[in-house]
Amino acid sequence: MKFMVTGALGQLGRVTVEELQARGIEVVGTDIPELPVDDLPALQAFFEGYRPSHVLHCGAITNVDGCETDRDLAMRVNGRGTANVAEMCRDFDSALVYVSTDFVFDGNGTRPYHHNDAPSPVSVYGESKLAGETAVLSHGRPDFYVTRTAWVFGPGGENFPKAIMNRANQGLPLSVVDDQVGCPSMTRDLAPAMVDLALSGADGGVYHMANEGSCSWYEFACDILTRAGIEVPVTTMSSSELDRPAKRPSYSILDCTRLTEVRGGPLPTYQDALDRYLEEELA
Ligand SMILES: NC(=O)c1ccc[n+]([C@@H]2O[C@H](COP(=O)([O-])OP(=O)(O)OC[C@H]3O[C@@H](n4cnc5c(N)ncnc54)[C@H](OP(=O)(O)O)[C@@H]3O)[C@@H](O)[C@H]2O)c1
């Protein structure tokens, strides 16, 4: 058994490599500049040399606002790059877990999104990640998985909890949107879930993968500060006041039942994950 993890310098990829190493599983992590997934010949050369049995595809352009202004890059890496990874996995008979996003949904839902609900992205980033999903699923392989996660944070990464604590520690005012709700998810819980799914022999297809619980960004900010023991006022604002280039789904709570059934239980609550994150990050 030999794993490949793309995007291994990113916040999820790095922790995923650590998870595999901790299990004693052979793994090679790849990232740019050495191995861009949108470089098919380079990818092919890597597969010919390493012949991974399992690929966990975390590499992506994740700058959601940046994707609005560089659509070509987003589609080339998240769409075509993922199609390249899927083609190589087909050719070399490797199982594939592709990490996708809640941003494939438009946010008009009124109950947690089921893995079979129709995607309808409202941003270029969401569109490009959906193009990746379509490429993976087009192979119809029983060992190709699309895992949609959300609001990712983890040790060493650039993420929302870190940004909130940095602003608070610098004495900057904190105003946070309260009209977007989702499922904060921690890399230390996502990584084992991906590895378990890759090894499960479960049916291929789409799986939602997030920590238990949901909140607004405002509630998440309050949770972060309370649990970090930082006492500063936080005010609310609306998404329209924030006026970011990319539209975000206002509601993107994920129903993770399918993954829960495969693993025999849900991921821990996001509050529990936050405590572990803070313990590690602030140590
Ligand atoms: N972060 C979130 O809130 C969130 C939510 C839902 C889903 N996801 C998905 O989860 C996965 C991991 O996200 P993350 O938070 O770990 O993001 P991240 O920290 O930005 O990691 C992504 C990694 O992929 C690399 N990358 C960029 N272009 C590449 C290319 N052409 N070929 C190979 N690798 C490339 C990035 O390098 P650079 O940093 O140099 O660009 C980075 O090291 C992504 O697929 C993302 O779409 C993330």
Image (spheres, rainbow, N blue to C red):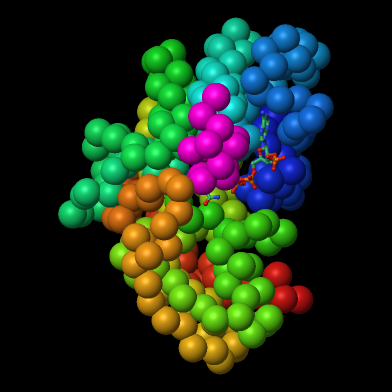
Q: In this view, does 207 lie to the left or right of 166?
A: left
Front-lying residue, 253 or 3 = 253
Q: In which quarter of the image is residue 251?
A: bottom left
Residue stretch rendered in magenta on the structure: 60-72
Quadrant of the picture in which ligand 1 is shown: top right
Where in the figure is residue 222, as x and y percent of width and height?
46, 80
Q: Which residue is drawn at 44% across and 35% down?
A: 124
Q: Is residue 88 above or below residue 123?
A: above
Q: Residue at x 56, y 91 (%)?
A: 231
Closer to us: 64 or 271: 64
- Quarter-of-image position of residue 43: top right
- Note whether 231 is above or below 82 in the view shown: below
Q: Position of residue 205 (x, y in %)?
A: 38, 28
How many numbered circles are shown?
Answer: 0
Which residue is the extreme one toward the left? 110
Image quarter hosting the C terminus: bottom right
Q: Which residue lies furthest to the bottom in this view?
A: 231
Q: Identify the residue at image location x=53%, y=55%.
A: 152
In the displayed structure image, the side of residue 87 where residue 116 appears, left or right: left
